[in-house]
């Protein structure tokens, strides 16, 4: 539920494209290079894309072009963006109804959104992102923007949009796969606890007129020996229930455990079926020496061994742009066909575009929200 970013480097011998690759168009990346885009439809290429991002900064430096941009969540607004300028009110609306309505003016459309939950709130002059944040905090929901400009969403842990039953297991030993679980070897497992943004209480409303909501338990103490007091102030963004909104906000401002996993493959597709692992999906992680285990998830049989892996939600995926992929520029226009697409694949500086040659997964334990794909 954050845009992420990308960087695409082109070779020195690339034709001058500063008048062609322009801001607010899109860089579209496919896992395999299909060749001339005119042999396909616009919807077909977007539907099969590995990633799509918004161009925000094309740069030409000493004969070499680099394209910088952000993920499609940018279209929902970040301080500046499409705003719900007329009153948008919801009374006991489902996640599907409310989220679909809040996409108004963003250019994004509803995809697979769970029709459950009950949300009430009133939103006017807010960006789409601000309203959606109020919705997801109140319902403990999350969403994901797809490369074809559709938005999927569900109440966390209840639907079928995100992978809630892991079929991928990250391991450091006993590498391999079996009939039901895909084993993925990790080169690096890092665990850290993050308390910088911790809050014990939230005031929902404005200064002088608000509703205070305190955590049910605050196990931390200040230097004077009293319970730690860190209080946030948030408008509530029009959410109808201050308590539900505060619960979601406080979950985001808890002490979070972040696991960083470095892999040698950018496409992780379960052998038992399903799509590739994406932000929002749950995966298993098994490395008891590093603290990656959970007795509640055992015994799980994997390659003849009984294990009890940690079950963690993928918050972020960072992966390299490597040779063999298809890289295109899709211009921003009132009407776009594949005749308008620009094939950048022959000009990509693969080494310059790869932040590393490995994929990096970041997973969070204790978080109510997910991040973005990079």
Image (cartoon, grey):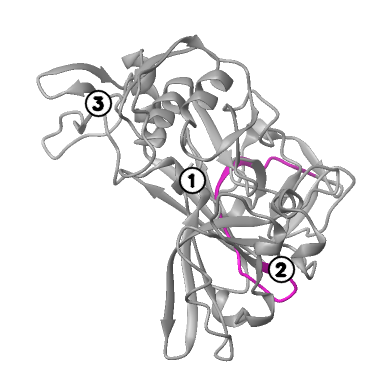
Quadrant location, the C terminus: bottom right
Element carrying mark 2: strand
Gap between marks 3 and 2, in whole Å? 44 Å
Inspect the magenta stretch and tell me whether residue 316 lies in it: yes
* Disc 3 crowd, CA 10 A, few/some/many (<14, 14-19, 20+): some
Question: Measured along the vertical axis of the image, is residue 126 above or below residue 43?
Answer: above
Looking at the rendering, the stretch of residues picked out in magenta corresponds to 306-327
Closer to the camera in the image, 218 or 280: 280
Between disc 2 and disc 1, whose residue precedes?
1
Q: Position of residue 24 (x, y in %)?
A: 47, 57
Question: Measured along the vertical axis of the image, is residue 362 above or below residue 19?
Answer: above
Quarter of the view holding residue 160: top right
Between disc 3 and disc 2, whose residue precedes?
3
- Determine contact: label 2, label 1, CB under 8 Å: no
Q: Which residue is mark 1?
A: 73
Q: Position of residue 212 (x, y in %)?
A: 22, 18
Q: Which residue is mark 3?
A: 235
Disc assigned to residue 303: none
**What residue is at 77 percent from the left and 38 percent from the top?**
300
Q: Position of residue 284 (x, y in %)?
A: 67, 44
Quarter of the view holding residue 124: top left
Closer to the camera in the image, 129 or 301: 129
Q: Position of residue 318 (x, y in %)?
A: 56, 60
């Amino acid at each position: 539920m954050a845009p992420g970013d990308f960087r695409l480097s082109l070779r020195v011998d690339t034709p001058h494209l500063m008048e062609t690759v322009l801001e607010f168009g899109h860089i579209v990346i496919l896992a395999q290079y299909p060749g001339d885009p005119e042999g396909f439809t616009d919807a077909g290429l977007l539907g099969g894309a590995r990633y799509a991002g918004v161009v925000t900064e094309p740069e030409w430096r000493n004969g070499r072009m680099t394209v910088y941009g952000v993920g499609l969540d940018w279209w929902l607004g970040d301080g500046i963006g499409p705003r719900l300028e007329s009153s948008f009110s919801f009374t006991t609306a489902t996640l599907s109804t409310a989220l679909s309505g809040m996409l108004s003016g963003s250019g994004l459309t509803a995809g697979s959104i769970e029709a459950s939950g009950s949300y009430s709130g009133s939103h006017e002059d807010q960006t789409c992102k601000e309203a959606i944040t109020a919705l997801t905090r109140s319902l403990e929901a999350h969403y994901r923007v797809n490369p074809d400009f559709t938005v999927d969403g569900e109440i966390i842990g209840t639907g079928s949009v995100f992978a809630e039953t892991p079929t991928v297991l990250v391991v450091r030993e006993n590498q391999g796969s079996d009939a039901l679980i895909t084993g993925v070897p990790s080169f690096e497992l890092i665990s850290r606890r993050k308390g910088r943004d911790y809050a014990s209480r939230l005031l929902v409303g404005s200064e002088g007129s608000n509703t205070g909501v305190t955590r049910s338990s605050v196990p931390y103490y200040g230097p004077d020996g009293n319970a730690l007091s860190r209080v946030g102030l948030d408008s509530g963004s029009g959410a109808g229930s201050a308590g539900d909104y505060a619960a979601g906000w406080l979950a985001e401002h808890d002490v979070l455990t972040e696991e960083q996993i470095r892999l040698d493959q950018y496409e992780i597709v379960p052998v038992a079926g399903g799509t590739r692992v994406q932000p929002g999906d749950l995966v298993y992680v098994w490395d008891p020496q590093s603290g990656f285990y959970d007795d509640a998830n055992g015994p799980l049989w994997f390659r003849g061994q009984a294990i009890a892996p940690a079950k963690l939600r993928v918050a972020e995926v960072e992966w390299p742009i490597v040779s063999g992929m298809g890289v295109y520029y899709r211009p921003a226009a009132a009407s776009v066909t594949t005749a308008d697409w620009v094939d950048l694949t022959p000009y990509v500086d693969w080494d310059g575009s790869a932040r590393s040659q490995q994929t990096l997964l970041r997973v969070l334990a204790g978080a109510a929200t997910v991040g973005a794909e990079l």
